[in-house]
Amino acid sequence: MALGFLGLVHHLLGELDKAIVKYHEALSIDPINPHVLELLNMALEASIIKVPVILENTEFNKTMVSLKEKYRRLKEPEHKGKDKAPRDVPSDVGPDGDEMNLG
């Protein structure tokens, strides 16, 4: 029961990860304690809803900027392979200016 109370203290202090660990420890001793189960569910739900605060100069933001730049460059068309033939050369004239004979 003391582990459950310790989890509750962590929970009230906003230390949800530590609270969840203590609730699991309490449930390892008394697996069907309804009070600890309810507190664990509340802590898990609160940890899912909790949105981390992201500051402007964090490593995460720097990584996101570099990834956006990388994928922006990938979307740009590249000129791979040979260029297309010019349109002013008729298709029935060979490279010497002679007509092509097929038969």
Image: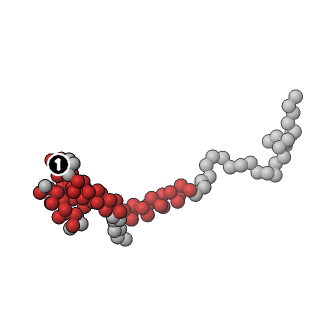
| 34 with respect to 49 (left or right) | left
Q: Quadrant of residue 17?
A: bottom left
The picture quadrant where one finds residue 36 is bottom left
Q: Position of residue 42 (x, y in %)?
A: 28, 60
Say which of 84 and 11 sits in front: 11
Instruction: Using the rendered view, name the quadrant where residue 8 is placed.
Output: bottom left
Point out residue 50 in the picture as x, y percentages from the top left corner: 33, 64
Which quarter of the image is occupied by the N terminus? bottom left
Determine the residue positioned at 45% across, 58% down.
67
Estimate how packed mark 1 is, as few (under 14), some (14 to 19) or many (20 or more) residues with alpha carbons within 10 Å: few
Q: Residue furthest left?
A: 2
Q: Is residue 31 above or below residue 43?
A: above
What colour-coding does the image apply? secondary structure
Q: Is residue 47 visible?
A: no
Do we see residue 67 in this rendering? yes
Residue 100 horizontal side relative to residue 19, left or right: right
Q: Considering depth in this image, is 30 or 16 the residue closer to the camera? A: 30
Counting from the top left corner in percent of width and height, residue 59 is at: 34, 63
Q: In the image shown, does 80 or 59 lie closer to the viewer?
A: 59
Screen quadrant of the C terminus = top right
In this rendering, the answer to whether 76 lies above or below 99 is below
Three-letter amino acid code at the position of disc 1:
Asp
Q: Which residue is mark 1?
A: 30
Q: SS class of the residue under badge 1?
A: loop
Q: What residue appears at the point 61 percent right and 49 percent down from the top-left corner?
A: 80
Name the residue nearer the viewer: 25 or 99.
Answer: 25
